[in-house]
Amino acid sequence: MTFTVEWVAEVARLAALAAEWDALVTRNSRPFDLHCWHMAWLAAFGGSAGQLAICTVREDGALAGVLPLIRDGRRLEAMANVHSCFFRPLARSPEAMDALIDAALQDVGAIELVELPDGDPSLEHLTAGMRRAGMVGLFEPGSVSPIVDTSGELDAWVKANHASWKKRLRRYHRKMEKDFEASFEIAKAPADLEAELSRGLALEASGWKGSAGTAIVSQPETEAFYREIAACFDARGELRLSRVELDGELVVFSLCIEQGGRLYSLKAGYDERFRKLVPGLVLQLSIVEHCFERGIGAYELLGERTEWKDKLATGQRSHFTLRGYRRNPAGLAKYSYRSVLRPRLRRIHHRFAGSA
């Protein structure tokens, strides 16, 4: 079995791979695997990153594997950041995966891959590939994303955990409908993407996220990324927007993608003037109920764990950062720092911070 390797360093060449790339993710696909996700990332964040370095392998002329990377000298990094949620190499067979990883590690000083999902088959191939390349690898814990299994019965889920909390949210829902002219739009494709998205992003930036500079529109590159993601998945028929209006005023908004029998929550925001009605949580409960009613298998609450996410979730997915270093003095020194010295320094820092 012979594979040919190509490193893609030009945006035009990357754009031309769209159909072949997406053909690799027809099974067990995630939105974050798709070609358009990486194109949106590159357009938004690539200017501040290193050189584009997409490692690809072909078998009999057909694309068989792809690993989207950024090169900085002899160091390679995942073409991903905090907005990526999920990252992994793609290949159509175990043999292609091994060939892809061997090619990526052939002449690299160090590599860093973030947000690798726990349990993904690629993790074993990556660790084995590092051994073949004479590298030492280090897994570090990343984000833990709660997931709501919505494949069963809604009533059983309501009763299972935090039942009184969920019932209280339903009472707030009824209070909205009693005290206001309430309109609930749950996980629907947008009729006017530009207008609906702009209105939702403005709402997200109106509260503490805007003040803290963490709202989508706070950074031009972040806004460009989410607008391009929304346009891409709207064109695919997979974008889902949710909102609640009270007396014609938008009070909560959510941006999701529905794909492969799962709903993925990207961003949400609410009007803090209505915080006593907890509109954000009321909307989240409505989305979960929608998933049960529609036969959607799971609702993925992406990002880090929070108290409210844990009250909805039935499980979670952990992610890891994998760092690989050469077995030379410089590489082993970096490995020792990350694996031994840095954790000790952090423990000392936390101990003194706690005492203070």
Image (cartoon, grey):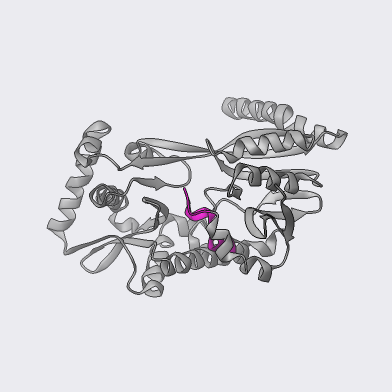
Query: Where does the image place residue 111, in percent across and percent down from the top left?
Result: 72, 44
Query: Where does the image place residue 198, in percent across and percent down from the top left?
Result: 41, 70
Q: Nearer the viewer, residue 131 or 250?
A: 131
Judge from the rendering whether residue 222 lies leftward or rightward of residue 287; answer left or right. right
Query: Where does the image place residue 30, in percent across and percent down from the top left?
Result: 48, 51
- Quadrant hosting residue 233: bottom left
Q: Is residue 31 magenta?
A: yes
Number of labels in the image equals 0
Compared to residue 150, the image places residue 69 above or below, namely below
Q: Nearer the viewer, residue 23 or 198?
A: 23
- Residue shown at 32% from the left, 73% from the top: 191
Judge from the rendering whether residue 240 lies leftward or rightward of residue 334; answer left or right. left
Judge from the rendering whether residue 307 lies leftward or rightward of residue 123; answer left or right. left
Specify whether residue 40 is in view.
no
Specify whether residue 252 is in view.
yes
Q: Which residues are magenta?
A: 25-39
- Quadrant hosting residue 194: bottom left
* Residue found at the far right of this picture: 329
- Quadrant of the snapshot with the C terminus: top right
- Residue shown at 32% from the left, 52% from the top: 280
Q: Is residue 275 magenta?
A: no
